[in-house]
Amino acid sequence: MAQATKTPAKGYAAHSATSPLEAWEFERRAPRPDDVSIDILYCGVCHSDLHFARDDWGMASYPVVPGHEIVGRVTSVGDQVSQYQVGDLVGVGCMVDSCRQCKACNDGLENYCAEGFVMTYGSPDKHDGTLTQGGYSDKVVVSERFVVRMPDGIDLKSAAPILCAGITTYSPLKHYGVKPGDKVGIIGMGGLGHMGVKLAKALGAEVTLFTRSESKKAEAKQQGADHVVISTSEDEMGAITETFDFMLDTVPVQHDINPYLNALKPDGTHILVGLLEPLDPAVSGANLVFRRRVLAGSLIGGMPETQEVLDFCAENGITCDVEMISIDQINEAWERMQKGDVKYRFVIDMASIKES
Ligand SMILES: [Zn+2]
Ligand SMILES: [Zn+2]
């Protein structure tokens, strides 16, 4: 039975764009009939958490408890919940609600909801207007539709980042029909890029990682990349003209995509998943027009596909490479993440918040 009252919760929150994350006590909403209450076990640390809290995208609200790679255990369910029971291991990703009525929502593409989806943190709740708060916390209350099941036997710690980094890279690979034998380039070797390498390999592609640094060559091979190209080398980039079917571009800062377009075969597709800013330098229309190439974008994935990628990872033995931290190490972890000093995702062990 659903509890009728709000629940006290502990989290780590940012109170302004410049303040560090600090312990904060708040309340989770009184569960609604379709809600699942979850004790959080682990939460991945995504670059978006930092961008949002630092107001880099001009959409921040405070206080904010970041975190949208949540794994936990169900502690109670509302009367209308049919998929989950107390004790189930579940996940919550980047979304906690949507309009549930538009074409995108009906197609299971809540990530493209016409009204915009409700983000796991920093969005007004559709019912009571309170700000949603994320997974750097001990518990969360989420509508069943936005909960996924952790597959049996999956390592929960290293599976947490699949809920953002995994689905973000899996969804476009599936949507554009990457198949065995396709040549796929993955640009960037961070949290997204290393998952992109593993997922594209598991789909049967021949995978090339593009990186600026020579030092990442060995790492990329370890992750399963068949080839590595140093993107700053004119020789190496010149040798791959018109050889790729797809480019999955995970770089979150402005960069010149023209050399990558020229590395695509005719009809090849370049997919942006990390960049939200204007393309600079500009894209030459000729690089698209003369070879009928496609420039595309993709944002996380819908709820059915989020379940699918978890199941796919469990079946194929794919996990994220993670470094575990306690909640009181979060500010240091954010500093290191900004320098790219993590292989490849921090995950918070939420047992540490109960002790703090
Ligand atoms: Zn994320
Ligand atoms: Zn919708």
Image (cartoon, rainbow, N blue to C red):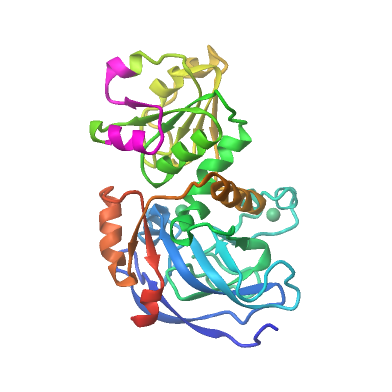
Q: In the orientation shown, which residue stands out farthest toward the bottom?
A: 5
Left or right of 299, for residue 42: left
Q: In front: 51, or 334?
A: 334
Left or right of 328, for residue 196: right
On screen, residue 78 above or below 3: above
Q: In front: 114, or 353?
A: 353
Q: In the rendered structure, does residue 141 fall within the stretch colored magenta?
A: no
Image location (x, y in percent) of residue 47:
38, 53
Q: Which quadrant holds the N terminus?
A: bottom right
Which residues are drawn in magenta?
216-236
Q: Residue at x 67, y 49 (%)?
A: 109
Q: In the rendered structure, does residue 219 fall within the stretch colored magenta?
A: yes
Q: Residue at x 32, y 26 (%)?
A: 231
Q: Residue at x 40, y 32 (%)?
A: 225
Write down the quadrant of residue 224 in the picture: top left
Q: Which quadrant holds the C terminus?
A: bottom left
Q: Where ligand 2 lies, by image quadrant?
A: bottom right
